[in-house]
C-alpha cells in the first residue's frame, strides 16, 4: 500500500537536518486576524493592499495611520493559536537536536514571537515597530492609540466618517521627525538582510513547509521554487489551493491551527 501524504511528510520531517517554514496571513486567521485577500482584506472601501503603499502614505499619511492603528488595536487582543505554538515547539525540538530550522513569515502581527518562535525572518516588517522619516531610527512601539488624536478612530465601517489628521497629530520621533509603520509596503524593497537570512534558511533545506499563504506576493513566494530547485520536499497547509500548490509534493487541506499540532508532533530521528 503506497504511503499516505502524512506518512511521507512525517518520515521526511523526522530525518530532516534542515527545515524551513514560510507562513502568511492564514496562520493567524484562527487567532482572529483577518487575512489580506479573504473577506477581511477590506478596510472601509479600501483593499488592504492599496493602503500598504508609499502612494497611499504620500496622499494621506493620517489615513494610513488610521488603518495601521486599527490593525494594532485589533492585534493587541489576539493570541497565538495552536498552529503558531506547534511551529514554535517544532523549532525548539530541532534546535535542541542541533538541527537547522528557519521560520520565514510574511506576517507583521508578532504572533509567532508571542508563541515562542525565536528570531523569525520577518520579510515584511512589524506592526509593532515604527521608523523615523528624518533620522531613520527603528523603535518598538506598542502605543494604542498610536497618538491621542487616533483614539477611537480606525473603524473599518465604510460609513465611518472620514477624518483628516494634521501633521501635528502624526506620531513623532524624539528628533521631531514623523514616524511611519516599519513595514514593507508594495513597491518597496525588502531588507537585504532579511532576504539573505531567508535564502540561507531555504538553501539546502530538506523540507519547506508553506502555511497559510496565497503565495501571490513576491519576492516572498519565490522561496518556494527556490526550495524546490534545492531538492526539498515541499508541503503546504491551507484551506484552499494557492498559487504554489502545483509545486507541492504533499498538500494538507484545512485550518493550520487544527492541522499543525498533530502533523508536526514528530521527534527528530
Ligand atoms: C518589491 C506588509 C521591488 C504590509 C506586505 C510594482 C512595483 C514593485 C513591485 C511590484 C509591482 N507589481 C508587483 C510587484 C511585486 C509586489 C507583489 O508581489 N505584488 C503582488 C500583489 C502581485 N511585491 C512588492 O511590491 C514587494 N516589493 O517587489 O519591491 C523593489 C525592489 C527594489 C527597489 C524597489 C522595489 C513588497 C511586498 C510586500 C508588501 N507588504 N505586508 C502590511 O501587512 O500592511 S504583503 C501583505 O500581503 C502581507 O504581508 C502578505 O505577505 C500579503 C498577503 O499574502 P498572504 O500572507 O498570503 O495573505 P492572503 O490573505 O493573500 O492569503 C491568506 C491565505 O491563507 C490564503 O491562501 C487562505 O486560503 C489561507 N488561509 C485562510 N485561513 C487559513 C488559511 N490557511 C490555513 N489555515 C487557515 N485557518
Ligand atoms: Zn528621528
Image (cartoon, grey):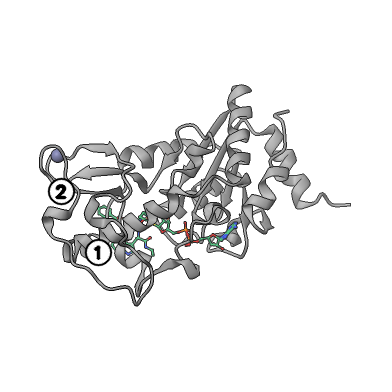
Please give the name of the residue rendered at 36% of the width and 58% of the height, measured from the top-left corner: 70
Where is ligand 1, by quadrant?
bottom left
> Could you tell me which secondary element the residue under label 1 belongs to?
helix
Q: Nearer the viewer, residue 245 or 128?
A: 128
Please give the name of the residue rendered at 55% of the width and 33% of the height, measured from the top-left corner: 101
Task: Left or right? Give the position of 197 relative to 209.
Answer: left
Q: In the rendered view, would you say 159 is above or below 24? A: below
Callout 2 crowding tier (Cα within 10 Å): few <14, some 14–19, many ≥20: many
Image coordinates of residue 15 in percent, x first then y, are 70, 32
> Could you tell me which secondary element the residue under label 2 belongs to?
loop
Give the residue at mark 2. 178
Q: Nearer the viewer, residue 218 or 183?
A: 183
Image coordinates of residue 197 in percent, x first then y, are 41, 36
Please give the name of the residue rendered at 26% of the width and 61% of the height, measured from the top-left corner: 64
Give the residue at mark 1. 63
Q: Nearer the viewer, residue 113 or 123?
A: 113
Furthest residue to the bottom? Answer: 159
Q: Earlier in the sequence, mark 2 or mark 1?
A: 1
Q: In the rendered view, would you say 154 is above or below 257? A: below
Task: Left or right? Give the position of 71 relative to 164.
Answer: right
Q: In the rendered view, would you say 257 is above or below 161? A: above
Q: In the rendered view, would you say 240 is above or below 135? A: below
Circles 2, 1 touching at the beta carbon (< 8 Å): no
| Residue 203 appearing in the image | no
Image coordinates of residue 25 in percent, x first then y, are 49, 55
Figure quadrant of residue 176 = top left
* Distance between mark 2 and mark 1 Cα atoms: 14 Å
Amino acid at each position: 500500500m503506497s504511503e499516505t501524504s502524512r506518512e511521507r511528510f512525517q518520515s521526511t520531517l523526522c530525518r530532516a537536518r534542515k527545515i524551513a517554514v514560510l507562513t502568511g496571513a492564514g496562520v493567524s486567521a484562527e487567532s482572529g486576524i483577518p487575512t489580506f485577500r479573504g473577506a477581511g482584506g477590506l478596510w472601509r472601501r479600501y483593499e488592504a493592499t492599496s493602503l500598504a503603499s508609499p502612494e497611499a502614505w504620500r496622499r494621506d499619511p493620517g489615513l494610513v495611520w488610521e488603518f495601521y492603528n486599527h490593525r494594532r488595536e485589533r492585534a493587541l487582543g489576539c493570541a497565538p493559536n495552536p498552529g503558531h505554538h506547534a511551529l514554535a515547539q517544532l523549532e525548539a525540538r530541532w534546535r535542541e537536536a542541533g538541527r537547522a530550522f528557519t521560520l520565514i513569515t510574511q506576517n507583521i502581527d508578532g504572533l509567532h514571537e508571542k508563541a515562542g518562535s525565536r528570531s523569525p525572518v520577518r520579510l515584511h516588517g512589524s506592526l509593532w515597530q515604527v521608523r523615523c522619516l528624518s533620522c531613520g531610527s527603528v523603535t518598538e512601539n506598542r502605543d494604542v492609540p498610536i497618538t491621542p488624536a487616533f483614539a477611537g478612530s480606525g473603524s473599518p465601517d465604510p460609513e465611518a466618517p472620514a477624518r483628516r489628521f494634521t501633521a501635528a497629530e502624526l506620531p513623532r520621533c524624539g528628533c521631531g521627525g514623523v514616524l511611519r509603520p516599519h513595514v514593507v509596503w508594495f513597491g518597496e524593497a525588502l531588507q537585504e538582510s532579511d532576504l539573505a537570512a531567508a535564502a540561507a534558511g531555504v538553501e539546502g533545506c530538506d523540507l519547506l513547509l508553506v502555511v497559510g499563504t496565497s503565495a501571490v506576493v513576491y519576492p516572498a513566494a519565490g522561496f518556494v521554487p527556490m526550495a524546490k530547485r534545492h531538492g526539498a520536499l515541499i508541503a503546504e497547509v491551507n484551506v484552499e489551493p494557492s498559487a504554489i500548490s502545483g509545486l507541492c509534493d504533499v498538500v494538507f487541506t484545512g485550518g493550520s491551527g487544527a492541522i499543525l499540532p498533530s502533523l508536526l508532533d514528530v521527534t527528530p530521528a
